[in-house]
Image (tube, grey):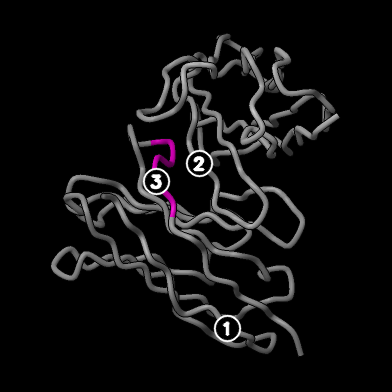
Amino acid sequence: DIQMTQSPSSLSASVGDRVSLTCRASQTINIHLHWYQQKRGAAPKLLIYEASKLQSGVPSRFSGSGSGTDFNLTISSLQSEDFATYYCQQSYITPRTFGQGTKVEIK
Amino acid sequence: QVQLVESGGALVKPGGSLRLSCVVSGFTFTGYYMSWIRQAPGKGLEWVSYISIGGSTVYYADSVEGRFTISRDNVKNSLYLQMNDLRDDDTAVYYCAREGGPNWADHWGQGTLVTVSS
């Protein structure tokens, strides 16, 4: 199975900060990497698919980059509604696997 | 708008069975693969199963292979997960999800809680 490792596990940031989250795959996955946001008590929500494509309706302050094994999710200016846990997921091969998540908290 | 509504979650004893349902609306069901994804309490996400549009292609995680069966009714716009021989570690919120691509989950239901406990 492909292991997905996210870093950091958690971070504290302030509204307006630029935040970058990392996801690393245990082997190359080309661009088959997707990002989700999950708020407490809610279902996950797709933010980015195929490494860098913004899902319809998602604010442009979210962006994704990377290919191969290393990927980033960047929030250009953190808003109060962005405090949540973020998961990456690979679809290069089955089983489709998720990272363990990065929790973004208020400083 | 796209809606997915799960039902069927319950408290069940180890070894028991449960059938989850997901009724969808707001999109053409026959245009999409569908999936079940679960999340144990306080834990991360696990892709449990997916099914192709016609139902001929299915996938199961190793952890549920042989115990769970995914199916769909394209007339009723519904997705199902038959869960047999349930174990304590099957306890989770089970989400129904539409697959974009396919290969990623672009719309999710609100989830239904399955608790396996004696």
Q: Quadrant of residue A14?
A: top right
Q: Position of residue A89 (x, y in %)?
A: 57, 33
Evaluate whether label 3 is on the same chain as label 1.
yes
Q: CA distance from mark 3 to mark 1?
A: 23 Å
Q: Position of residue B48 (x, y in %)?
A: 53, 55
Circle 1 residue:
B10
Q: Residue at x 49, y 61 (%)?
A: B110
Check the picture and name the quadrant holding the N terminus of chain A: top right
Q: Position of residue B105 (x, y in %)?
A: 43, 42
Provide the secondary structure element on which disc 2 rests. Answer: strand
* A100, above or below A34, in the image: below
Evaluate whether label 1 is on the same chain as label 2.
no
Could you say which disc has been placed on residue A45 in the image? Answer: 2
Left or right, A103 with respect to B64, comes to right
Q: CA distance from mark 3 to mark 2?
A: 7 Å
Circle 3 residue:
B107
Q: Position of residue A24 (x, y in %)?
A: 70, 20
Q: Quadrant of residue A6?
A: top right
Residue segment shown in magenta: B103-108
Q: CA distance from mark 1 to mark 2?
A: 24 Å
* B71, above or below A28, in the image: below
Determine if the magenta segment contains residue A73.
Answer: no
Provide the secondary structure element on which disc 3 rests. Answer: strand
The kind of residue tagged 1 is Ala
Q: Which is nearer the eye, B59 or B48?
A: B48
The kind of residue tagged 2 is Lys
Tally of numbered tags: 3
Q: Which chain contains the residue that carries disc 2?
A: A
Q: Residue at x 79, y 35 (%)?
A: A105
Provide the secondary structure element on which disc 1 rests. Answer: loop
Q: Residue at x 63, y 38 (%)?
A: A98
